[in-house]
């Protein structure tokens, strides 16, 4: 039986203006869906619009056009305070920089309990304390950490606090916006493993945003590749990694180093030229093979289908 969609993004646009003039088309007509219990990886270079996509989904930005459906309900049509509270409980975000996303004047107890207080999830102070201590242990910290302040923790520990804060309201869906990019490599693996364990234990659904395609491949079921506001390729993790079709995806993959000196000595990067493509029509996302979508024109679509058939 096919999994139900938790999230559907339809023709989403987020444009930023200066006065009446549009200056940046950060997200420019992208569509994708995320199934229940899935990790959908969104990857691309800095400035491609992936973080803006995440922030628009959770309504930190208002959409310029398009729809975001969460459990079949339009996120951007929710207006009342009660509707927004319910949405914020079901959808949470883990931010890129744990140092700037944690209030330095608040104890860890109050940081994690903020959502618990807003949504009235604890009947009294004792239950509030127990919930926070349980969350700290869930993310691999000690209950004694509850009385400390953010500056007393390492980067990896701060990110665990951020994860505990997101989990505090028992969400269904979490947007992880480059949650490991500010961490040491050894700590990155610990945080990713923690996210995977939590997903299994609590049946969570993730949108995992990153610029490191190798890490996204490791954690994701499906991957969407973004370039300057557009979704240029979308397929399963293995398909994107082993059988990329769009030149930009190939360029990203060619930049991934391997722990093999012999390979690295002869590795050749594939340069991507955004002007080297068919200009006879506006490209659109097309299904070249089952569940493998590529942004292309009709001519490029036929060329990609020939490549797939030849393999």
Image (cartoon, grey):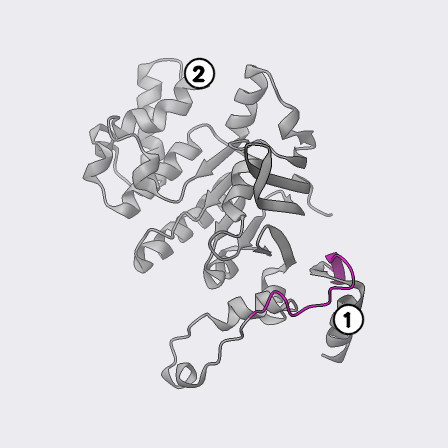
Do residues under tags 1 and 2 come within 8 Å of each other at their CB atoms? no
Residue 205 image point, x, y percent: 55, 42
Query: Of helix, strand and loop, which one carries label 2?
Result: loop
Residue 227 falls left or right of residue 168: right
- Extent of the magenta region: 272-290
Q: CA distance from mark 1 to mark 2?
A: 54 Å
Quarter where residue 302 is shown: bottom right
Query: Of helix, strand and loop, which one carries label 1?
Result: helix
Residue 150 image point, x, y percent: 24, 35
Of marks 1 and 2, which one's residue comes earlier in the chain? Answer: 2
Which numbered mark, 1 or 2, is in the foreground of this view? 1
Q: Residues within 10 Å of mark 2 (few under 14, many from 20)?
A: few
Q: Which residue is mark 1?
A: 305
Residue 158 falls left or right of residue 48: left
Image point (39%, 39%), residue name: 163
Q: Which residue is mark 2?
A: 120
Q: Is residue 276 within the magenta segment?
A: yes
């Amino acid at each position: 039986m096919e999994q139900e969609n938790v999230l559907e993004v339809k023709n989403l646009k987020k444009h930023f203006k200066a006065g009446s003039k549009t200056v940046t088309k950060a997200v420019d007509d992208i569509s994708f869906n995320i199934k229940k219990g899935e990790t959908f990886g969104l990857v691309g270079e800095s400035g491609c619009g992936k973080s803006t996509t995440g922030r628009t989904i959770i309504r930190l930005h208002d959409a310029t056009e398009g729809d975001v459906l969460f459990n079949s309900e339009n996120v951007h049509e929710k207006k009342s305070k009660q509707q927004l509270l319910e949405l914020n409980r079901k959808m949470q975000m883990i931010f890129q920089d744990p140092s700037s996303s944690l209030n330095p004047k608040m104890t860890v107890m109050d940081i994690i309990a903020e959502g618990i207080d807003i949504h009235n999830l604890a009947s009294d102070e004792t239950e509030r304390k127990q919930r926070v201590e349980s969350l700290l242990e869930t993310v691999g910290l000690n209950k004694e950490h509850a009385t400390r302040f953010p500056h007393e923790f390492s980067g990896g520990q701060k990110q665990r606090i951020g994860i505990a804060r997101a989990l505090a309201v028992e969400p269904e869906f979490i947007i992880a916006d480059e949650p490991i990019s500010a961490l040491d490599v050894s700590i990155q693996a610990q945080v990713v493993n923690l996210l995977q364990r939590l997903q299994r234990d609590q049946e969570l659904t993730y949108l995992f945003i990153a610029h490191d395609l190798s890490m996204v491949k490791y954690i994701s079921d499906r991957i969407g590749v973004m370039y300057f506001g557009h979704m240029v390729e979308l397929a399963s993790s293995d398909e994107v990694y082993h059988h990329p079709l769009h030149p930009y995806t190939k360029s990203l993959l060619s930049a991934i180093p391997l722990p093999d000196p012999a390979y690295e000595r002869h590795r050749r990067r594939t340069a991507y030229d955004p002007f080297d493509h068919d200009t006879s029509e506006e490209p659109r996302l097309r299904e070249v093979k089952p569940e493998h979508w590529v942004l292309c024109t009709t001519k490029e679509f036929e060329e990609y289908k020939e490549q797939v058939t030849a393999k």
